[in-house]
Image: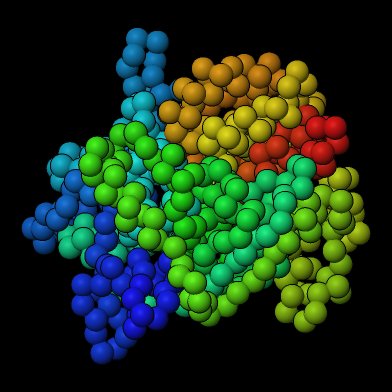
């Protein structure tokens, strides 16, 4: 920044560095550095390219991984051959992805590849996600990659095609929002609790039209896994993206990753990345400050991520909300969730537990859950407890540490990587009317299957629910 240059936010720095051209209507053509592709939002885009005789402009800047529809049950038979996928639609989408990546020469981690996993886990762990880049994917939770200082956001199928063909997007600049989390994080409180608290504070529309930058001491002391959780759920607050400025924690995480820069390029990259911070005096359009000491282990009660309370709290009454619209929404949520106002959160019994998703399926998440499980056993009333690692690399690391045995001995199911029960798009669904403690990111009606009832919480809290058979304050099990 020079004397005559006004201070900029991190978002403004990345945006300005990627403008190809600006238009009179306020839109700009933005260069896209990285593109992640999966099986759900890409088939139509590739087919359109075929029909127009177009090639993928930069296949080397694209990475494809199957995740949404892929079953998390074993994928190889005893003889090493691939097992068939039972659902015809899922099988067709996965076959289409395989055909498309081969035809368009796109790097691909297939269903049985060691590196396969959820796109938003694979990107960071491979070093495909880098600070200061623009990164897109046909999935709303692409915001997760902002944890490493990338401007990352989800796009639609037509935009997937546009990026494949041109490596650009026509976009309108977003407003900026600062979320500061200051103070020390209390015992038992995780990044998942912090982001649920943020969403509960500002609402699911609180960041609409904005890019959030998470700042403050609590964020700076957070691991990359924790930052990925925070940035991932930015979209649940209505944000276009979430950002955290890269720092030494980021550089340590990325050093030596397969797709990260090496040698002199690494040194030059780090020099540039260190400039990617909001300047002193930069002005945000909105600013919110959270005191970490005010947060306790949290859980949702309704059908929106903003329907959240601390575990010591109670199911609210619709009348406790300020306007008629929210009162009606709360009443509708409670009817769907089968909950009575005033019920203590710790009195709510659980039928299923899901630990996984692009929000909470990394090694730190599995360690936290395993630490709670210990030598305990799954409660008899819990019908299923799925542990779904976010990638093959996470799975292998967890197995090397013996975490899989902790879960198996407790009666949990140890699965292959994939999106799994985060969404009702594969066999891992929650039956109608049954209740799931889930580490995923959305608790909408039918999100985990038609009629499924979802409570969002952290991996440690989910593990506690599996052991006790109900929503439980993890601090009680941890002493």
The answer to whether residue 417 is left or right of residue 194 is left
Q: Is residue 96 visible?
A: no
Percent position (x, y) of residue 113? 33, 27
**Quarter holding the C terminus?**
top right
- 159 versus 271 height, above or below: below
Q: Position of residue 198 (x, y in %)?
A: 66, 62
The structure residue drawn at horizontal position 72% and vertical position 50%, both measured from the top left corner, is 185
Give the residue furthest to the front.
Answer: 3
Q: Is residue 286 left or right of residue 127?
A: right
Is residue 361 shown left or right of residue 291? left
Q: Out of 104 and 238, give the one closest to the viewer.
A: 238
Q: Which residue is the extreme one toward the top?
A: 79
Camera-side residue: 365 or 118?
Answer: 365
Residue found at x 32% / y 52%: 271
Q: Report how many numbered discs are placed on residues in the image.
A: 0
Closer-to-camera residue (430/278): 278
Residue at the image point whose x is 41% and y is 24% from the top: 75
Say above or below: 109 vs 205: above
In the image, 179 versus 198, the foreground residue is 179
Q: Quadrant of the N terminus?
A: bottom left
**Colouring style:** rainbow
Q: Is residue 135 above or below residue 401?
A: below
Image spot of residue 297 (x, y percent): 76, 48
Q: Residue at x 47, y 58 (%)?
A: 245
Of all residues, the one furthest to the bottom in this rendering is 24
């Amino acid at each position: 920044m020079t004397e005559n240059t006004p201070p900029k936010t991190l978002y403004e720095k990345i945006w300005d560095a990627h403008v190809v051209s600006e238009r009179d209507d306020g839109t700009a053509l933005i260069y896209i550095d990285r593109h992640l592709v999966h099986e759900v939002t890409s088939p139509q885009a590739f087919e359109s390219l075929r029909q127009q005789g177009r090639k993928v402009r930069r296949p080397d800047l694209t990475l494809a991984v199957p995740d949404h529809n892929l079953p998390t049950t074993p994928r190889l038979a005893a003889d090493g051959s691939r097992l068939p996928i039972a659902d015809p639609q899922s099988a067709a989408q996965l076959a289409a992805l395989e055909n498309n990546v081969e035809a368009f020469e796109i790097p691909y981690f297939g269903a049985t590849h060691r590196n396969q996993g959820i796109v938003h886990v694979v990107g960071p762990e491979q070093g495909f996600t880098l600070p200061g880049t623009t990164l897109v994917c046909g999935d709303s939770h692409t915001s997760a990659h902002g944890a490493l200082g990338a401007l990352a956001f989800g796009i639609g199928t037509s935009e997937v095609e546009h990026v494949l063909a041109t490596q650009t997007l026509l976009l309108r600049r977003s407003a900026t929002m600062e979320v500061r989390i200051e103070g020390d994080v209390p015992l038992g409180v995780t990044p998942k609790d912090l982001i649920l608290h943020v969403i509960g504070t500002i609402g699911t529309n609180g960041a609409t039209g904005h890019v959030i930058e998470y700042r403050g001491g609590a964020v700076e002391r957070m691991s990359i896994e924790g930052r990925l959780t925070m940035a991932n759920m930015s979209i649940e607050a209505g944000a276009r993206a979430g950002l955290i400025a890269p720092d030494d924690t980021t550089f340590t995480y990325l050093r030596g990753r397969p797709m990260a820069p090496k040698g002199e390029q690494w040194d030059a990259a780090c020099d540039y990345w260190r400039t990617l911070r909001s300047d002193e005096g930069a002005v945000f359009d909105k600013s919110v400050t959270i005191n970490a000491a005010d947060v306790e282990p949290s859980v949702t009660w309704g059908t929106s991520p903003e329907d959240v309370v601390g575990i010591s709290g109670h199911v609210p009454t619709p009348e406790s909300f300020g306007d008629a619209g929210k009162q009606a929404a709360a009443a509708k949520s409670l009817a769907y969730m089968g909950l009575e106002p005033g019920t203590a959160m710790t009195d709510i019994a659980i039928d299923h537990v899901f630990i996984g998703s692009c929000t909470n399926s990394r090694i730190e998440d599995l360690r936290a859950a395993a630490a709670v499980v210990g030598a305990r056993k799954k409660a008899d009333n819990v019908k299923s407890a799925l542990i779904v690692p976010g990638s093959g690399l996470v799975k292998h690391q967890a197995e090397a540490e013996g975490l899989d045995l902790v879960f198996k001995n407790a009666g949990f199911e140890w699965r292959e990587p994939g999106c799994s029960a985060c969404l009702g798009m594969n066999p891992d669904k929650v039956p109608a009317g049954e209740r799931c403690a889930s580490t995923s990111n959305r608790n909408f009606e039918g999100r985990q299957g038609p009629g499924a009832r979802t409570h969002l919480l952290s991996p440690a809290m989910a593990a506690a629910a599996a052991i006790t058979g109900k929503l439980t304050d993890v601090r009680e099990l941890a002493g």
